[in-house]
Structure formats: structure tokens, C-alpha cells
Image (cartoon, grey):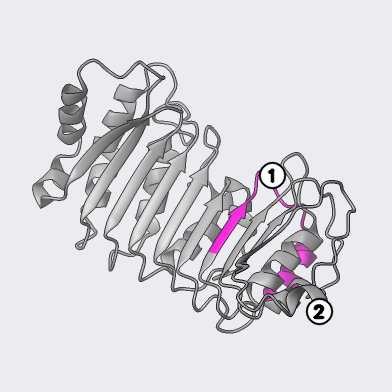
Amino acid sequence: MVRELVIKPKADGTYIPFVHARLLKPLRYLRLLAYDLSNSEQWIYPPRYHSLVARDITQLAIHYPAIRSPTTAMWLETFRLVWSLPKLSVLFLDLTRYPDITESGMRHLRAIRRPGACAELKTLVLKGEFCCNLLPECAFGTSVKQLSLLFHGDRLGPLGSNYGPLLAQINHFSSLQELHIYISRSGRPGKDTSAASGYIVPVLAHLRPDALQTVSFRLGNLGSGRRGHFFLELRSKVDELLTKFPRLGSVSFQLPCPVGDLPRDVGMLERLLLDRLPKLRETGVPVTLQWHHP
């Protein structure tokens, strides 16, 4: 009956010897491994330790320290594990700080990548911009069909030169069908930290047009008076990009709304949104506007 194994040390340096024959032998249907490093400052397991539990793992989730930078060992062992899972189909990485990794560490990381790694990976969720510039080439393979990017926002987005590795990786996803982008906070309109210029535009610009069918954008906080500016940026920067995907079947926008404060004229805002996407509207692709409580 056991399908999931969650490892969460409560204090730094806590060693949980979960790769143990008496524990793992009965767990023949274990499919998900979740490793929570939020309370850890270092990677205390020996190399390849996790791969011993990974024979049939199809889903992997790793949550990194929230107040400390992941060490070189954490970053190396993360990808050593990811690349050792032949059946991995779902991967979630939650990174809130830049990994503290040296150039020699990056060379080592590139050297241990296996041919055919992530060949079965179909769903990828990356939370936080901070891993974007520290990815080895083709870190997640080429077979991803569902991609979710959760950005903190209000800082230089993937358009910046440091985020080239992430955009290069996105360009490898030739069979991508679903794209979901969540930006927790948008910077000033027109700047490289804004939701449209800093995040949406560079990601769409690097996607291959072959297979994409569904796109959703969710904004956590637009800031005071920035909703109209966001709509304007859609027309000048996003509208034409969305028309390059011939199989696109739906586009949705989810905008923030304080609890109990739904805009009075929702219909007017929906019409305004459509008015800001004239080229997409001509293609007949359905566009929806939804509201959520941040």
C-alpha cells in the first residue's frame, strides 16, 4: 500500500538511514520520493545513497533550505539522483536561494550527466529563479510535456543573461503541450522585472511552436494600479508571441483580487483583456480571465 516516502530531518545534521533492507524490501510499490532539506545546511548522505531506493521511483520532489544557500554537494547529488532514475516522470524542485557552487563544481556536474537521462520525464515543476543560471546543458532531457515555472518575481527575470541555461533548456522541449507560469510579484511595468517583460516574454520566445496546446499565467501581486499597465504590455509584447503556436487551444489569465473585493465590472475587464490581444483573438483561441485571492 505504501507509495510515498518523505524524508524531512528536523535539524541540521540529522541522519535518517532510510536506505535499509528491512525498510525497503517490503516497499515494492514505492513510487514517490520527497526530500525536504529546509532544515539542513549540508548534504550528509554519501554519494549515490538515494539511488539505492530509486529502482522504481517515478516522482521526485526536493525542497531546499529557505534561509541558506544549497551547497555544492546538494546540487551535485540532486542531479546525480535525478539522472539515475530511469523511470522518473515527475520532478519538482523548490529552490529559494542561489546554490553555493563553484565553477569546478559545475564542471563536475556536467561530467556526471548520463546519456539518455530524464528520457521519461514528462512533468517538470521549477519553483524559484535561483536555479536558472546553474543548470547543466539539457539537464531535464527533451521529453517534458507539462512545464510549470513558479517565479518569485519583482527581480530580474529569465530575460537577464544569467538565465540563459533555463531558456536554452526550455528550447529543448519540442513536445511541450502545457505551460503554466506563476509570478508571485510583478515589478514596475516596462521594466525587466515586470511579469510580461521579465518572465512571460522570454519564456514564450524560447519555446518551440510545435506542440503547445495550453498556456496559463497566474500573477500573485500586480502592485497598486498595475493591472492596466499589465494589459497594455500584453498587447505590445505578448499578443503576437502567442500566435506562433499553431496548436494552441486555450489561454488563461488568473489575476489577484483581495478577498471580498471582486472588481465591479468583471465583464468590462474581460473585454479589455480580449481587446489587448487582437492578433490572438483573430486565431479563435479561447481566452479566459479568472480571479484568485493571493
Counting from the top left corner in percent of width and height, residue 134 is at 65, 58
Name the amino acid type tagged 2.
Answer: Ala
Decide which of 155, 9 is in the foreground and name it: 9
Which quadrant would the N terminus be assigned to in this image?
bottom right
Side (left or right) of 70 relative to 229: right
Side (left or right) of 173 relative to 33: left
Q: Residue at x 62, y 77 (%)?
A: 85
Query: Is residue 140 visible in this depiction of the protein?
Result: yes
Q: Secondary structure at mark 1?
A: loop
- Disc assigned to residue 60: none
Residue at numbered disc 1: 97
Look at the numbered discs 1 and 2 and tell me whether their residues touch, using CB distance below 8 Å. no
Q: Answer with the quarter of the image where residue 48 lies.
A: bottom right
Is 102 one of the magenta-colored residues?
Answer: yes
**Position of 286 relative to 143 (above/below):** above
Counting from the top left corner in percent of width and height, residue 16 is at 85, 61
Q: Residue at x 50, y 61 (%)?
A: 124
CA distance separating discs 1 and 2 = 35 Å
Counting from the top left corner in percent of width and height, residue 57 is at 61, 73
**Position of 172 relative to 56 (above/below):** above
Is 213 one of the magenta-colored residues?
Answer: no
Disc 1 crowd rating (10 Å Cα; few below 14, some 14-19, many 20+) is some
Region rendered in magenta: 91-111
Residue at numbered disc 2: 21
